[in-house]
Image (cartoon, grey):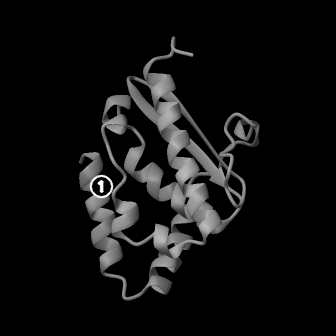
Amino acid sequence: MNINDTQDEIIEHFSMLPDWHSKYEYLLDMEDCLPVMDAALKTDESLVHGCNSKAWIQAELQDGKLKFTADGETAIARGILALIIKILDNRTPDEILASELYFIDSIGLMENLSMTRAQGLEHLIEKIYALTKQLQNPTDP
């Protein structure tokens, strides 16, 4: 299954939920899918700056594919991280950089988050693409 297939699967699942309250509850439940991040990895370098609550993400290249580790202080942050990692984990840098995370708009996530959480989500996505570029070209500054 490719990145778009996974996004389409998420969109389909969210479309079956009757209202935003149900979708929000589903996001909260998604936090359980995110493994606990080792405290030693929660550094300033892995911190997503600009988030309403603290969130961390780091990536490493294993056998040509990115493996993400993430955590957040709140259930909603952890749920959003779990969704994004479900889509992008174990993909090549080229796959990630060629992708667009259209599921965010399709499920109405951005429009149903507070302005500060929406800005945090944008910072998270920027950080993911920056990490991906860095690992794709490790000799670049």
Q: Amino acid at mark 1?
A: Thr
Please report the residue visible at 52 percent of the width from the left and 43 percent of the height from the top: 126
* Pick the front one: 42 or 45: 45
Q: Secondary structure at mark 1?
A: helix
- Residue 110 horizontal/vertical position (percent): 48, 67
Q: Quadrant of the C terminus?
A: top right
Whole-percent x and y of residue 1?
24, 48
Residue at numbered disc 1: 6
Task: Single out the residue that lies furthest toward the bottom.
Answer: 18
Q: Is residue 43 left or right of residue 48?
A: right
Q: Would residue 72 be found to the left or right of residue 13 on screen?
A: right
Is 11 above or below relative to 2? below
Question: Mark 1: few, some, or many residues within 10 Å (few <14, many ≥20)?
Answer: some
Look at the picture and state if 78 lies above or below 22.
Answer: above
In the rendered image, residue 139, in percent from the top left (x then y), is placed at 51, 11
For the residue pair 129 and 72, the one nearer the viewer reads as: 129
Q: Residue at x 53, y 32 (%)?
A: 131
Residue at image position (33%, 65%) is: 10
Which of the 4 quarters of the picture holds residue 114? bottom right
- Image quadrant where residue 107 sits: bottom left
The residue shown at (26%, 51%) is: 4
Q: Position of residue 123 (x, y in %)?
A: 58, 49
Task: In the rendered view, tell whether residue 14 sits above or below residue 6.
Answer: below
The tally of labels here is 1
Q: In the image, is 51 to the left or to the right of 25?
A: right
Of residues 42 and 52, the one drawn nearer to the viewer in this rendering: 52
